[in-house]
Image (cartoon, coloured by chain):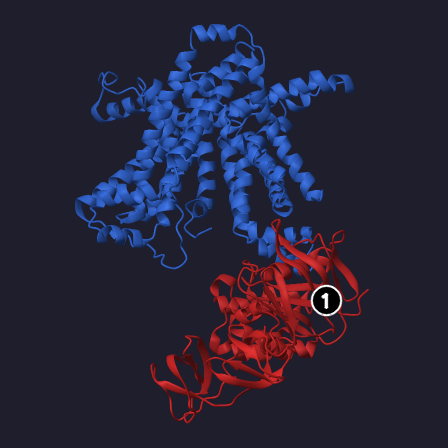
Chain colours: A red, B blue
């Protein structure tokens, strides 16, 4: 048996006879850890959660929870016997019960369990749902229903909590606050959790580890920092959409040369022989703006993002490069104007493919 | 696939219901007596011709009355429009055979019409001038006024969910009210109208009481005669098979004619509740008169006729063992409804949790019992029991099982079960369709077993639907005639059989009292469930 609290080994995830994600392996080392699975819509993230919950069967590999085999080709512990809770994306509250009754149905499970218990009041305060307790599911908004469903799942205090896009319907203004509260409560209660989301910011904030699922595979499973800064494939770069790949030639141990930007210095995370032609990952925060620089590129677009602007610059070879500039920067540039890039260009960790 | 309690129960329930249906089909290949030759040379064509004429006329009339009244109460406001909205469904309380008795009682020589004219204008030779609604016309009227509510209810429900946006769109395109009706409103309600007409068609082809009373020979009476008069079960079954083909052909024809047209509206966002148009002057009077006339002819008229005779001949009231009839009826209703609901619930849940294709096909076949006339089912049941007794049981048991099943409460309830299984199954199924499958999954994930999910989550959710189905089945059983007539135990009568027996002995006055009780009981059932029947609360 595995020493990890939760472990998936070589599992193909299927639904309605179709394989959605192949040969997946990952683990959660300690009880109470939170991990996130990221991927585009329809890729099979929900199928993974449904399978872990026991709602779908597997014909290859194994899933273990707390030292117990719960799914394999031959064994499939029924969902009701797993002590795994899944909060569905579409909330699935029982329509004929009030929100309070719905949540209390969840409380019936594990009432014998030892350890710290979360009360209805705590959960109601946490998710700010006091005002809807006496309402029926059809009388509340989608965001409120999602929070009620989350409350029902949390109150069961399962061995493993699975959250499918838990905050997708929650208002943007309230989302961050709920994220903070959720992280705190999961931490306090030490509930091991797998969260599925397509929001990378949410995943990076909530998860101690993130898995990226693309093209039927788990492409990367790592710390959020590493996933963002050290993506292991071009697909992950494209999915995160936080940078571009530009052609470059390795010119030394710590240098590269690009036709438009000139010399780029930094620390390679992987060694390449001198003279190799590579694709360099350039993220918006890698380049610095400098009005006095003689490296000038044309502004083709400017997006205001509150704390910063993202400029899209066109190089002489028609490559489009994104650059962050703090929104308090004194001199903002209009489209078609020239934009200076500080030289020499230094990138802390150079990622190439 | 896991074989569990739910799978096995659902499997056997479906098989049980399918057996009599299969018996009808298998009988097609059996040899028959020379009655077939006699019939072929004499009446068979007449049977078929009469059935077709009856069917077409009833369909046209129920379409006009049903959609006309549904259109008026759904789109316009006029005096008593809210009253008519539910009053029009009361016609369900009057089975066609009781309507036929009323029609005859009113228009016959020296009947109620004659008495009214005599009281108003003194003695006279009025019989010559009073029209006689008997024969084919009598059957058509009886069936149409008794069955139009199927079309009315379903069409009105469909009108109810037509968005104001469609109406506004029509106005925007410059359509007149008439053009709006035939190019937007009616086509959009087509599946509902057709569903209503299909039910009318099935009931018409299956009708026994009224056609027998007016001595019109149809395929249904042919089945009865070949069995009762010529003791030819095989040929009765073969005629049944033809009748079934007729019913299925109607379904197929409609499905083909629909082609690829879609009738589902996306009601998420954009749906606007219709605003009823207030009618004034002549238009308002016309709408009122139309609905009143339909209400009067379909419900008040037969009710008053039966009430009039009950008061006029009170001795019949005292002759009748009302308590016995009532307890017999309640006994059958409770026993059958509860059995139907329990087994249909189990079967539905079995289908839901096992998601098994074989089970699904079996369930679909099992609900075709409603399309099969009661008289056919009764005959098929007797055929099957006779076969079972002769071929299997005789060698195993020292006694015959015929006495256990034929002419017994058990046999009666079993055939009711087959006949009305689709009502229970489909009713519960539509209730289940409102429960998203993720509700079940949530329940499992909260630690509830399948049995606990069924008992603690599903049953409370379906409570209202179950009550509605209970009343609907009760209503059908109270009105049911041919199965009860054929399979009831000796000396066991219901209001329906008592009325039929009196009427067939030409004692219409005596038929009035049981008919009146039947109408009153059925009316009370309808009133209790009217809000569900009308679907105003989106149930």
User: Total of numbered circles in the picture?
Assistant: 1
Front-most of A78 and B73? A78
Quadrant that contains the N terminus of chain A: bottom right
User: Picture coordinates of residue A140 (x, y %)?
Assistant: 48, 66
**Lateral position of residue A186 relative to residue B110, left or right:** right
Chain assignment, label 1: A
| Quadrant of res B325 | top right
Is residue A115 positioned above or below B458 on the image? below
Residue furthest to the left in view is: B281
Q: Residues within 10 Å of mark 1 (few under 14, many from 20)?
A: some
Of residues B193 and A133, the one nearer the viewer is B193
Q: Residue at x 56, y 20 (%)?
A: B379
Determine the residue positioned at 55% across, 7% down: B33
Q: Identify residue for label 1.
A: A110
Q: x%, y% of residue B158?
A: 38, 45
On-image quarter of the C terminus of chain A: bottom right
Q: Position of residue B127 (x, y in %)?
A: 26, 17
Left or right: where does residue B94 sit relative to residue A89? Answer: left
User: B391 and B231: which one is in front?
Assistant: B391
Instruction: State whether residue B48 is above or below residue A215.
Output: above
Residue B105 visible in the current orientation: no
Q: As rendered, which of B327 and B16 lies closer to the eye?
A: B16
Query: Against B248, is A331 above or below?
Result: below
In this rendering, is residue B102 above or below B218? below
Quadrant of residue B192 within the rendered picture: top left
Q: Is disc 1 placed on a helix, strand or loop?
A: loop
Left or right of B212, for residue A268: right
Q: Residue shown at 75%/68% (left/top)?
A: A112
- Can residue B262 be seen by looking at this rendering? yes
Q: Position of residue B246 (x, y in %)?
A: 44, 24
Name which residue lies at 28% across and 24% down.
B113
Spot the residue most to the right: A1
């Amino acid at each position: 048996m595995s020493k990890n609290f939760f472990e998936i080994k070589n599992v193909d995830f299927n639904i309605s006879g179709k394989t959605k994600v192949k040969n997946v392996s990952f683990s959660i080392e300690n009880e109470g850890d939170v991990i996130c699975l990221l991927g585009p819509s329809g890729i099979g993230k929900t199928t993974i959660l449904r399978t872990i919950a026991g709602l779908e069967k597997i014909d290859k590999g194994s899933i273990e929870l707390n030292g117990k085999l719960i799914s394999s080709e031959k064994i499939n512990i029924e969902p009701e016997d797993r002590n795994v809770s899944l909060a569905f994306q579409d909330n699935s509250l029982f329509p004929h019960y009030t929100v309070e009754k719905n949540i209390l149905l969840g409380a019936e499970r594990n009432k014998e369990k030892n350890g710290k218990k979360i009360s209805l009041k705590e959960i109601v305060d946490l998710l700010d749902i006091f005002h809807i307790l006496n309402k029926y599911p059809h009388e509340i908004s989608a965001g409120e229903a999602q929070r009620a469903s989350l409350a029902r799942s949390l109150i069961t205090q399962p061995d493993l909590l699975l959250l499918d896009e838990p905050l997708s319907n929650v208002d943007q203004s309230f989302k961050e606050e709920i994220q903070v509260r959720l992280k705190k409560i999961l931490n306090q209660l030490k509930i091991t959790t797998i969260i599925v989301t397509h929001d990378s910011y949410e995943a990076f904030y909530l998860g101690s580890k993130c898995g990226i699922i693309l093209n039927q595979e788990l492409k990367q499973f790592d710390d959020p920092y590493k996933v963002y800064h050290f993506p292991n494939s071009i697909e992950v770069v494209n999915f995160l959409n936080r940078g571009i790949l530009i052609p470059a030639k390795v010119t030394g141990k710590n240098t590269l040369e690009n036709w438009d930007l000139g010399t780029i210095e930094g620390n390679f995370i992987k060694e390449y022989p001198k003279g190799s032609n590579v694709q360099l990952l350039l993220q918006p925060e890698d380049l610095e703006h400098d009005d006095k620089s003689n490296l000038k590129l044309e502004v083709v677009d400017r997006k205001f993002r509150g704390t910063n602007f993202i400029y899209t610059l066109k190089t002489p070879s028609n490559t489009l490069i994104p650059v962050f500039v703090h929104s308090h920067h004194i001199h903002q540039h209009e489209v078609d104007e020239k934009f200076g890039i500080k030289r020499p260009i230094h990138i802390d960790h150079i990622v190439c493919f | 696939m896991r074989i569990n309690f739910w799978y096995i129960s659902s499997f056997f329930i479906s098989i049980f219901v399918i057996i009599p249906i299969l018996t009808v089909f298998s009988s097609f290949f059996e040899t028959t007596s020379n009655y077939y030759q006699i019939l072929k040379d004499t009446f068979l064509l007449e049977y078929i011709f009469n059935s077709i004429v009856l069917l077409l006329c009833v369909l046209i009339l129920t379409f006009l009355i049903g959609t006309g009244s549904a259109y008026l109460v759904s789109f316009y406001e006029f005096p008593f429009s809210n009253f008519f909205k539910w009053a029009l469904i009361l016609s369900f309380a009057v089975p066609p055979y009781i309507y036929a008795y009323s029609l005859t009682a009113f228009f016959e020589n020296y009947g109620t019409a004659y008495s009214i004219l005599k009281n108003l204008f003194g003695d006279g030779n009025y019989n010559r001038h009073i029209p006689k609604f008997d024969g084919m016309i009598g059957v058509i009227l009886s069936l149409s006024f008794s069955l139009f509510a199927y079309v009315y209810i379903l069409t009105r429900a469909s009108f109810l969910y037509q968005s104001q946006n469609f109406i506004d769109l029509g106005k925007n395109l410059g359509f007149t009210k008439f053009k709006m009706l035939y190019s937007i409103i009616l086509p959009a309600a087509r599946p509902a109208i057709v569903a209503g007409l299909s039910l009318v068609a099935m009931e018409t082809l299956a009708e026994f009481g009224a056609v027998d009373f007016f001595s019109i020979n149809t395929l249904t009476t042919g089945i009865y005669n070949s069995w009762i008069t010529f003791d030819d079960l095989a040929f009765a079954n073969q005629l049944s098979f033809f009748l079934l083909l007729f019913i299925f052909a109607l379904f197929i024809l409609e499905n083909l004619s629909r082609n690829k047209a879609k009738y589902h509206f996306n009601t998420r966002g954009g749906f606007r509740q219709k605003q009823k148009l207030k009618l004034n002057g002549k238009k308002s009077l016309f709408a009122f008169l139309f609905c009143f006339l339909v209400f009067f002819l379909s419900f008040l008229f037969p009710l008053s006729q039966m009430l009039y005779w009950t008061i006029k001949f009170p001795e019949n009231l005292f002759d009748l063992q009302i308590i016995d009839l009532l307890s017999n009826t309640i006994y059958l209703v409770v026993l059958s409804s509860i059995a139907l609901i329990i087994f249909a619930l189990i079967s539905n849940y079995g289908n839901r949790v096992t998601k098994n294709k074989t089970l699904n096909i079996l369930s679909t076949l099992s609900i075709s019992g409603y399309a099969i006339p009661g008289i056919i089912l009764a005959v098929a049941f007797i055929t099957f029991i006779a076969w079972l007794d002769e071929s299997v049981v005789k060698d195993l048991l020292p006694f015959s099982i015929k006495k256990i099943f034929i002419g017994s409460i058990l046999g009666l309830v079993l055939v009711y079960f087959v006949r009305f299984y689709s009502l229970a199954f489909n009713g519960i199924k539509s209730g289940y369709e409102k429960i998203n499958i993720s509700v079940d999954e949530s329940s499992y994930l909260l630690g509830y077993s399948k049995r606990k999910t069924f008992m603690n989550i599903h049953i409370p959710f379906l409570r209202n639907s179950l009550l509605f189905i209970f009343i609907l089945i009760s209503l059908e059983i109270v009105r049911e005639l041919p199965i009860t007539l054929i399979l009831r135990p000796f000396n066991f009568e219901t209001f329906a059989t008592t009325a039929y027996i009196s009427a067939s002995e030409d004692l219409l006055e005596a038929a009035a009292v049981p008919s009146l009780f039947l109408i009153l009981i059925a009316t009370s059932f309808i009133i209790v469930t009217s809000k569900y029947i009308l679907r105003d609360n989106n149930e």
